[in-house]
Amino acid sequence: MELPRARRLVLFLVVISGLMGLYMLFVSLQIQVPWHRPLSDTKDASSSLEAYEVRDSVPVDTFVATPIPELGIRFRILPKAGPNQTVALQGLDGSTRPTIEAPLEAIEGSTPPPKPRAITTTTARTTTVPSRTTTPDFFGDHYTSEDAPLLTSCPDSIRTKVPHTSFAKRFLGRVPVLQWAKHATESEYQRLSHFHGAHGWGGVKFPLLKACLSVLNTSANRVMFDDWERRANRSQCIRCAVVGNGGILRDSKKGLEIDQHDYVFRTNGAVTKGFEQDVGSRTSFYTFSTNTLRNSMHSYHGVGYNGPPLAEETRYVFLPDHDRDYILMRASAMHTPIETGPERTKTPPKYFGENASVEKFKMYHPDFIRYLRNRFLRSSVLNGRYKDIYRPSTGAVMLLAALHTCDQVSAYGFMTPDYKKYSNHYYDRTFQAVAFYVNHDFRLEMDFWQKLQKEGLLRLYMRQ
Ligand SMILES: *[C@@H]1O[C@H](CO)[C@@H](O)[C@H](O)[C@H]1NC(C)=O
Ligand SMILES: *[C@@H]1O[C@H](CO)[C@@H](O)[C@H](O)[C@H]1NC(C)=O
Ligand SMILES: *[C@@H]1O[C@H](CO)[C@@H](O)[C@H](O)[C@H]1NC(C)=O
Ligand SMILES: *[C@@H]1O[C@H](CO)[C@@H](O)[C@H](O)[C@H]1NC(C)=O
């Protein structure tokens, strides 16, 4: 039996439009973006600071991180924040924070931040306003402010120079760089659970957050340079070497110079064995997120990277993207197994050594990461579909943390304008082009290092 031709055509159209409708539905729900290739020119080369990062909002026990070196990252898009969260945020301002830094008026070279919204209106606290107008302030350019005791009287420290540079207005000398037990309060949770990923505590349940952060209750967890006072060879200024993993370091012979700083910062696949002449051997601070650490162990095993450095001086600074980070930090410091999630273990995790004491662990404060994103690395990615997964790269966070804590900073192995001449990493066996990822903006970061260098805030290693 043959349908008349016209009816067949109609049927065909109905089926096609049905399929398209389904497709549109999936797209508009933004459930998942399929395998993504790195964004960029395949012929580029030099220092990407880390390989594969995944941001997601899926509960730990259902989430599988699957880095595929050749293809890039599998992403999930964060769900849009609901209207309830706005009301919670709006109800919060004022009393919960000791000081609120003034919102930034404008940042050169970037779109002006949204006006601090509705926080002062009383009506917004009780009424449900249509979601268009109550979309929570994505940027949240307000941060807590804390006193950090000065450890030195360095005459030409970064903090004394900043007021004379173009960064004066956006630089906050009192933004907390680290979070610890004190911060795990209900009111701080109300304020920060509105921001996702590294920028807040969204997706981390309060009891879990509290149980984990409260482990960081020693004086060493509160400050970066917890051993400074005990050091016999203190200099007048705290001089830091911050070492990225860029190919520019290969054959640089900078190892000795790096090791001669008071503190040496490293990140992710920072293998030093066999590369001491070029990159040095000390590591005072190792910065990573659980995800970047696991990916580094997976991707750089072949070049000798077997995990974080285990020297006595080494401190481990988590960049928490996810509740996985809080869970791993607690288990590593308390020496307890992890019962659920991708880091599930039967025995206590050993990434940081069998006997790592709680004093060895630190964690970046979400206010600090959000402040870096908003004020220094406000990428155009934030105007597009990847805005929820964008964050400053792990290397960028490490370098900016040093700029906010050290008196003087030298950076090595970070991306420079001639990056195409160098392999992606100094430890690459064969030349690899620099890989770019949709959740970072390496070019913006590269330009920013150049600006800091020109303003005299940073000594950036360049080949010429
Ligand atoms: C939003 O708030 C209403 C009223 O308090 C509540 O019934 C609802 O469950 C909340 N929705 C979410 C997603 O939390
Ligand atoms: C710090 O935390 C540990 C483990 O949670 C606990 O045993 C200890 O009593 C706490 N110390 C202080 C001073 O609160
Ligand atoms: C300071 O002393 C420590 C311990 O003796 C040593 O590891 C470090 O290299 C010294 N730092 C400098 C800058 O000489
Ligand atoms: C850890 O501590 C135990 C008990 O103090 C000791 O026997 C062991 O050798 C230590 N392990 C390492 C790697 O230092």
Image: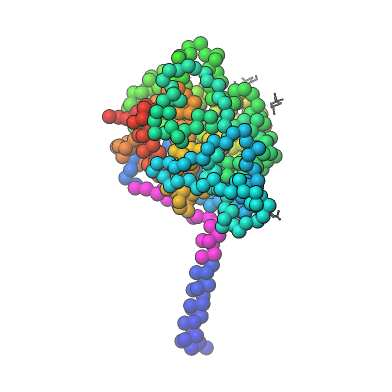
As drawn, the residue found furthest toward the left would be: 464
Residue 32 lies in the magenta stretch: yes
Left or right, residue 451 beside residue 172:
left
Q: Is 239 rendered above or below residue 350? A: above
Q: Is 36 rendered above or below residue 330? A: below
Residue 45 on image: x %, y %: 34, 40
Left or right, residue 166 beside residue 364:
left
Left or right, residue 191 beside residue 279:
right
Q: Front-most of 392 and 433?
A: 392
Q: Is 28 rendered above or below residue 217? A: below
Kindly identify the residue that appears in the image at 33 percent across and 43 percent down. Answer: 44
Kindly identify the residue that appears in the image at 52 percent across and 69 percent down. Answer: 21
Asked which quadrant contains residue 445, the reply is top left
Residue segment shown in magenta: 24-41
Left or right, residue 187 beside residue 113:
right
Residue 354 on image: x %, y %: 61, 26
Asked which quadrant contains residue 46, the reply is top left
Q: Front-most of 389 and 7?
A: 389
Q: Front-most of 337 and 202?
A: 202
Figure quadrant of the C terminus: top left
Residue 150 lies in the magenta stretch: no
Residue 456 on image: x %, y %: 36, 27
Ligand 1 quadrant assignment: bottom right
As drawn, the residue found furthest toward the top would be: 232
Kindly identify the residue that appears in the image at 60 percent across and 58 percent down. Answer: 130
